[in-house]
Image (tube, rainbow, N blue to C red):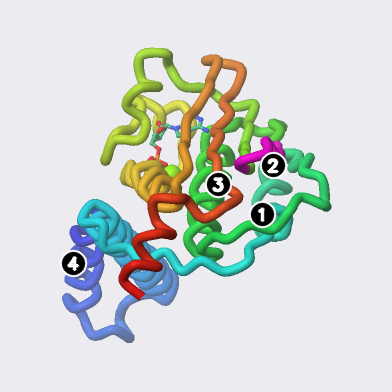
């Protein structure tokens, strides 16, 4: 756990005067402390997000929003990581998709979650594909990978808090998350009136889809008018 790492390394650093500890050891300890602090901050923010979403207390700040722009920007941000794993990133969405009304920051969070999962669970040389389609009433966004896939029996539990496919860390290596990303993504998408789901073939890859309604949903708009 990050807290155990922080207290362990801080304790180690206080056993002797700092200048008596070799510089490499100090650097290693401080890097681990920094890394663990970041993970802990992320974890606490995730828990807070989830608590707010559960209580229906999340304020969705809708502004004109271009999904294509956000997908493009996310792909650019991940480019250096993709290169590290010799992965290919593809963007299929047409540039002229209509703008909709959505919370830019929160939808970015959903896409970042999905892209980082696709990245994490895809071996070297794989492909990550982003797409968005205009389905008339709604836009449908997808994030596909050519990774390890998800067992059939797990698909129904993916969006539950703290749920992770057992043994995945051993197969993929790297740091383990906490299993909150998809629960948060579901909360955010549903707060926008959309849906989120996954399709997967173990050993071949996974596609996550989510939809966002193009118009402000009827159940929200009249109530706002009455109380205004
Ligand atoms: P966090 O997002 O909190 O850092 P996490 O990535 O493990 O941690 P989720 O994003 O909620 O948590 O995903 C839950 C689990 O679903 C993952 O641990 C993994 O087992 C499985 N999973 C999610 N996306 C994929 C994917 N693209 N391919 C294979 N398995 C996946
Ligand atoms: Mg995740």
Q: Which residue is mark 4?
A: 7
In the rendered structure, find residue 41 and report the number of the disc placed on it.
none
Which residue occupies 68% across, 38% down? 136
Q: Which residue is mark 2?
A: 132
Residue 53 position within the rendered picture, expressed as x and y whole percent measured from the top left = 29, 55
Spatial distance from mark 3 to mark 2, Cα to Cα? Answer: 13 Å
Spatial distance from mark 4 to mark 1, Cα to Cα? Answer: 42 Å
Q: Residues within 10 Å of mark 2 (few under 14, many from 20)?
A: many
Above/below status of 82 relative to 18:
above
Q: Which residue is mark 3?
A: 213
Which residue occupies 32% across, 66% down? 41
Evaluate whether residue 32 shows in this view. no
Q: Nearer the viewer, mark 1 or mark 3?
A: 3
Which residue occupies 79% across, 40% down? 92
Q: Earlier in the sequence, mark 1 or mark 2?
A: 1
The magenta span reads 129-138
Q: Is residue 39 magenta?
A: no
């Amino acid at each position: 756990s990050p807290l155990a790492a922080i207290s362990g390394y801080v304790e180690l650093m206080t056993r002797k005067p700092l200048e008596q500890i070799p510089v490499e050891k100090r650097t290693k300890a401080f890097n681990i402390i920094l890394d663990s602090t970041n993970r802990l901050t992320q974890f606490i923010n995730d828990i807070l997000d989830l608590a707010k979403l559960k209580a229906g207390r999340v304020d969705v700040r809708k502004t004109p929003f271009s999904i294509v722009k956000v997908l493009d920007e996310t792909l650019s941000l991940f480019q250096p990581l993709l290169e590290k794993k010799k992965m290919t990133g593809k963007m299929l969405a047409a540039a002229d998709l209509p703008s909709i009304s959505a919370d830019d920051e929160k939808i970015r969070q959903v896409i970042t979650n999905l892209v980082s999962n696709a990245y994490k669970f895809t071996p070297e040389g794989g492909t990550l594909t982003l797409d968005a389609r205009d389905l008339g009433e709604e836009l449908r966004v997808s994030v596909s990978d050519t990774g390890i896939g998800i067992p059939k029996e797990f698909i129904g539990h993916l969006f539950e808090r703290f749920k992770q496919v057992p043994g995945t860390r051993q197969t993929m290596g790297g740091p383990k998350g906490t299993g909150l990303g998809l629960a948060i993504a579901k909360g955010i998408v549903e707060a926008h009136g959309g849906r989120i789901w996954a399709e997967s073939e173990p050993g071949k890859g996974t596609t996550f889809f989510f939809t966002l309604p193009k118009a402000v949903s009827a159940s929200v708009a009249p109530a706002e008018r009455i109380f205004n």
